[in-house]
Image (cartoon, helix red, strand yellow):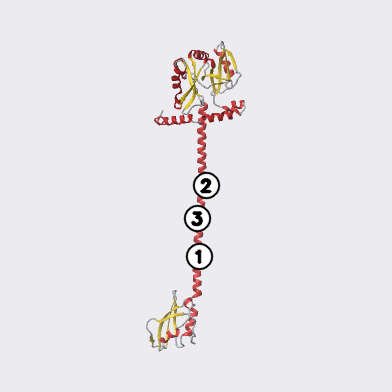
Amino acid sequence: MSSATQSLQPLLDNVRRAWRTSPMPRFFQWWGGELAALLPVRWRYAFGGGAAWYLLEKQGDDWQVRRAGDSLPLATWSDSLDPAAQLVALSDALRGVDPEDLHIALCLPSTTMLRRSLLLPIAARESLQQIGAFEMDRQTPFRAEQVRYDVRDTQGPAPAGRFAAELVAVPRQTLDPLLERLRAVGIGIDAVDMASGYDRLGVNLLPPEQAPRRSHPRQRLNLALAAACVLLVVMSLGEWLHNRQAALSAMQSQVDSMRAEAQKVAALRQQLQDNAGAAGFLADRKLHTPSALSLLDDLSQRLPDDAWLERLSIDNAGQVGFQGQSKQAAKLIDAVKGSPVITDANFQGTIQADPTTGKERFYMVAQLRKPDTKAKATPAHTGSAR
């Protein structure tokens, strides 16, 4: 036993003790018995599983064997037969029984048994054999080494903190010759008990050193099958998780692809909005900004006949620059004042006389009027710009 198992042993003992003292074992035993009673006897034998107890009894000079709970014997043979014949009779009676489930109990008549009722503390459930040896001197005229005994929990009513038990004993001088005879014949038994109706009482007076050693291949197979089932469940869960992860990955890929497409659509929408905004801005600016033709028309009407323009420019900020010649350039400020197209007209630089034409050369700058500051047009002078 490893150190880890030894350290857990007290805890396991406490859990086992708490389970045995609780009402749950009795409930499950009663419930299982009630459910089993609803099945036909043949079905109970077929599906019962576990240990199949057969009772071996000595009737005078004869032996008989019957299944626990049945009243009719399966076989009867004389004890005077040779051991081989007795084994054949027993084997014929137990033919068809799984050797792993087969359990034989030697049942003694109640007249040979000594029974005493006990009320024991709850803590004594884990040491019934020691309690039986202690109670033997008090409850019977025998000493513990003179008898074969067992103590069973009767599940009967008991005061708080105690449980009902029964001490069952048989003198060794009665039991040991029977055990010697069975060993001589070659019949192995699993328990020594007392007959109770058609069944057994539920004690085991067989000495532990004489208990047969059994192999349990089916139990190992069941453990292997249980381990395989656990492995299959784990693999199924792993496969389920893998499928879920694969589905999640596929969905994530689709989401990423849709997100990329959505980003492209959003970029195209933004580009469309920008283009629409730019087009709207240009259309709005074109709508609310005076055209060069209207500017030329307004200047042609406002400048006197002796003035003409040599150059006209309009930049993106709406600043207008025009250069030309006039006989009286200083009066041009008053001429363009009140224009619905331009405002803030001023000379840039100085007015210079042109000796070739005899006129004054000028350069003026102005600002195109905005829509909200556009004034009502004033009567314009007649004439044309040259």
Dividing the image into 4 quarters, which one contains the N terminus? Answer: top left
User: Residue 343, percent across and down?
Assistant: 44, 80
* Front one among 64 and 382: 64
Residue at mark 3 to residue at mark 1: CA–CA distance: 20 Å
User: Residue 19, percent across and down?
Assistant: 48, 31
Amino acid type at circle 2 is Ala
Q: Residues within 10 Å of mark 3 (few under 14, many from 20)?
A: few
Dot 3 falls on a residue whose secondary structure is: helix
Image quadrant of residue 359?
Answer: bottom left
Q: Residues within 10 Å of mark 2 (few under 14, many from 20)?
A: few
Amino acid type at circle 3 is Arg
Q: Earlier in the sequence, mark 3 or mark 1?
A: 3
Identify residue for label 3. 259
The extreme top residue here reads 80
Q: Earlier in the sequence, mark 2 or mark 1?
A: 2
Residue 357: which numbered mark, if any? none
Q: Are marks 3 and 1 in contact (CB under 8 Å)?
A: no
Identify residue for label 2. 247
Residue 273: which numbered mark, if any? 1
